[in-house]
Amino acid sequence: MSIKRVLFVCIHNSARSQMAMTYLNHYGSELGFEAESAGLEPGSLNPLAVEAMRLDGLDMSNNPTNSVFDFYKEGRKYRYVITVCDPEAAEKCPVFAGVAKRIHMGFKDPSSFTGTQEEKIAKTIEVREEIKQAVLSFIEQYQDR
């Protein structure tokens, strides 16, 4: 089985790309998927995203945040590069050599949520579920490619 390397990219590599990477590595590793995540301007992990994933039984609290440009400079190669931010930010991502397919999956940014802590975690869980379903659909669509 050949390894299908996937890179998830968003702005800060703090929530959406981290959740997508965690789900793909959890559900897709036995099917040959290997995921990483990076950001255009890497920050620190979003505690709402960490908590939302913990509530789904997955720990991403020790994940590093990475720069997409560092990965590019290192010459990393991916079969799929998936942007999970807004379309304007997705256009700023570098083009990786050897990428077979570039995909965009847009999700709301948990760092933009307002309200009480309970309201923000509830909105983050909604995004988490959207990401989870998108990753599961991606696995189903691309597992044999």
Image (cartoon, rainbow, N blue to C red):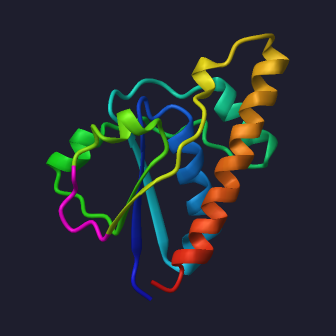
Instruction: Give the answer, above or below, for where 78 lies relative to 125.
Output: below
Quarter of the image where the N terminus is located: bottom left
Report the residue at 42% width, 24% height from top.
43
In the rendered structure, which segment of residues is drawn in magenta? 95-100
Residue 88 locus on image (x, y percent):
37, 34
Residue 13 locus on image (x, y percent):
45, 35
Residue 137: image quadrant is bottom right
Q: Is residue 42 magenta?
A: no
Q: How many marks?
A: 0
Quarter of the image where the C terminus is located: bottom left
Report the residue at 81% width, 10% height from top.
116
Dominant secondary structure of the magenta stretch? loop
Report the residue at 43% width, 29% height from top.
12
Query: As drawn, is 86 to the left or to the right of 133?
Result: left
Residue 99: image quadrant is bottom left
Residue sitting nearer the eye, 1 or 111:
111
Instruction: Give the answer, above or below, for where 124 lies relative to 139.
Output: above
Residue 107 locus on image (x, y percent):
58, 40
Report the residue at 76% width, 29% height from top.
123
Residue 97 locus on image (x, y percent):
18, 62
Instruction: Give the answer, above or below, for where 116 lies relative to 83.
Output: above
Residue at the right extreme of this rendering: 118
